[in-house]
Image (cartoon, helix red, strand yellow):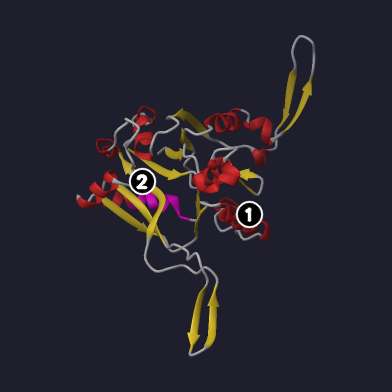
Amino acid sequence: MKVVILCGGKGTRLREETEYKPKPMVTIGGRPILWHIMKIYSHYGFKEFILCLGYKGEMIRDYFLNFEERSNDVTVTLRRNGSERIRHHHPQHLEDWTITLADTGQETLTGSRIARIEPYLGKDESFLMTYGDGLSDIPISKVAEFHQQQGTIGTVCGVHPNSRFGILEVNGNRVTNFSEKPQLEGYINGGYAVFNREIFRYLSPDGSCVLEQQPLKTLAQEGQLSVFRHEGFFYAMDTYQHYEEINRMWDRGQRPWVVWEHAAHQP
């Protein structure tokens, strides 16, 4: 099953970073958030990716076309008749990934981006989908299994949103507890999803189709949209404050989305 990642948006609320790079290339701990997302999927055995490129997509293309040079030591011998490169591979830096870099247009909206990559799915009857800005410890393999059991066209992951503000618990005129940005009740769409091939009947490649509007609303009305409830970690990097906060988490070693390292450290 292939993984479709939407990488084409402009990320205007993260202008401090996205003025010079696409949002999926904004870094956490020195690596693009896109790399972190792909590592999550890869950990669960999903290693074929289709990246829907748009705004500054050439930077994402360049990153992966030169991935080995960026990830390993390189010796370069310069000669007049051409240079020679010797890569010194570090196994821990190698990724066993197949990546399709698809230009889906500068202004194309989400549903149309997905519609335009249908040929790259081959004969697959279903695919995984996410955005290039959300991190989670969602068990992807369980989501895929859950989707197959439901028999619906689509499955989205429901996650708990975090409050933008700290919550005060009070008794009279005294504060009895203070919760810094706690999780709220209820679920929102966490952006991790699975779709059957039938989803393309609800999408249009014309550029103006928004996945989150009529297509998902219609699926819900028809009883064709399931939800996998996730009670664990989810974080969307939407603003510069989010960027700073997630990097502080990384620096503190608070990295719940790094499931590939957690598994390696288990006895």
Q: Is residue 11 left or right of residue 200?
A: right
Q: Are marks 1 and 2 in contact (CB under 8 Å)?
A: no
Circle 1 residue: 247
| Of marks 1 and 2, the one in the foreground | 1
Secondary structure of the residue carrying tag 2 is strand
Pointer 2: what residue?
194
Q: Is residue 120 left or right of residue 214?
A: right
Determine the main secondary structure of the stretch shown in magenta: helix
267 or 245: nearer the eye?
A: 245
Span highlighted in magenta in the image: 138-146
Q: Classify 151 as above or below 124.
A: below
* Amino acid on which disc 1 is placed: Asn
Question: Quarter-wise, where is residue 229 in the image?
Answer: bottom left
Image position, residue 112 (x, y; %): 35, 35
Q: Quadrant of the C terminus?
A: bottom right
Q: Which numbered disc, 1 or 2, marks the residue that appears first in the sequence? A: 2
Residue 233 position, x and y percent, is: 50, 60
Q: Residue at x 24, y 49 (%)?
A: 224
Residue 102 is situated, as x and y percent measured from the top left of the image, at 45, 29
Q: Residue at x 38, y 39 (%)?
A: 110
Residue type beneath disc 2: Val
